[in-house]
Amino acid sequence: MGRWAGKRRHAVGVSAGACALLLSVLGGIPEASARTAPVSIPIVADNGSGRAVTPGRSCADGGTGAYWHHEYGVELPAGRFAAGPSEALVHLDVHSDTERFPNVDGPYPGGANPAGFLQGSESHASLLNDRGSVKLRLTSGTCAAPTLTFDGSTAAGAGTWAVDSGSGAYRSITGSGAFTVQAGVDPGADNPLNLNLSGNLTVPTPALGVTVVRTYWGGLGTDYVSRRVSVVYRITNTGPGDSFGVRITALTNPTNGVTPFATAPIALGDLASGESAEIVVRHQLGLLAPCALVILGCNFETRFTVSMPDALDIAGPALGPVTVAVKAPTLPPPL
């Protein structure tokens, strides 16, 4: 799943009337460059299948022993990795220099000592959803120092993982952690897997920018008479990270005598890095404030606070408030 193509433009609300003035007042707020989240992801499957190469080449001869390559896959419910459902694909490359043949019953060779390991360059877990994918490399022991119990049928133990790569909204993801695993590697296509991942993942953050696009008199010009000005605002994700479920959580006019005809929260949808959503808000101007009687070219301010969850669904603190300057049209409508 590649990075989102293009820059989409969302429109929230519908406006009517003619454009009287184009403004380009930009407001923004600095944001930390990345957010880190603790993760705990259990992956339980029962469809593992693969192949074994036994007895393999021993460690003493420069090999990595016998090995079992098995694949497992399972759907992850919403909330386990991301807000929506995901899929986990796991490839385990189990090696052993002491268990040379499959399906060995009885005690482990050498008593209770570990007898297997994961080939770290080849063992991995991939997490995929409609936002993108993350590949984690799994490592546990070496040929000279195996760390898994393994009887030729089931490998069990612990190890570490690190992010290998990411795509889509996870394109710049980093992280590492630990895991525990119990995996069957028998012949057939019904081998069980119980893999538990824990650790931390870090993704680039979204950031907030607000632009006033234009102002106009709505209602076929009658809003000029009732002292109501319509403003088109553009909300932009100016950060390096994508954002999901963006919402305006507060919209106010700090200028005396101005009242917005809009109530938060206002949903804006998903905004990839660089994408924007536009909203139209009508504002009531008082009779004597902010401008006495004549409202042509009247100046006031609008303040926004916005929730911008990242690709890991970390909402973080709401961004803002961002204040932008607004100027009413300088000409009356053609009534």
Image (cartoon, rainbow, N blue to C red):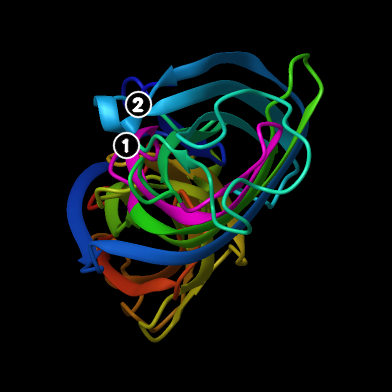
Percent across and percent down for residue 196 are 63, 54
Task: Name the residue located 31 percent from the left edge and 71 percent from the top edge.
Answer: 322
Q: Identify the mark nearer the N-term, 2 or 1.
A: 2
The answer to whether mark 2 and mark 1 are in CB contact below 8 A is yes
Q: Which SS does the magenta portion mostly show?
A: strand
Query: Toward which corner of the image does residue 202 lie, by quadrant?
Result: bottom left
Q: Amino acid at mark 2?
A: Arg
Q: Check disc 2 and report the residue beneath it.
A: 3
Residue pictured at 39% horizontal, 34% vertical: 119
Q: Magenta span has 21?
A: no
The C terminus, quarter of image = top left
Please provide the residue range marked out in magenta.
147-174
Q: Which mark is residue 223?
A: none
Above or below, comparing residue 224 to residue 335 in the picture: below
Q: Residue at x 62, y 66 (%)?
A: 263
- The residue nearer to you, when weighing 292 against 326, is 326
Is residue 150 on the magenta stretch? yes
Image check: 192 left or right of 15? right
The amino acid type found where label 1 is placed reads Arg
Whether residue 180 is visible to the viewer of this picture, yes or no, is yes
- Of helix, strand and loop, which one carries label 2? loop
Coordinates of residue 49 in the picture (x, y in percent):
69, 17
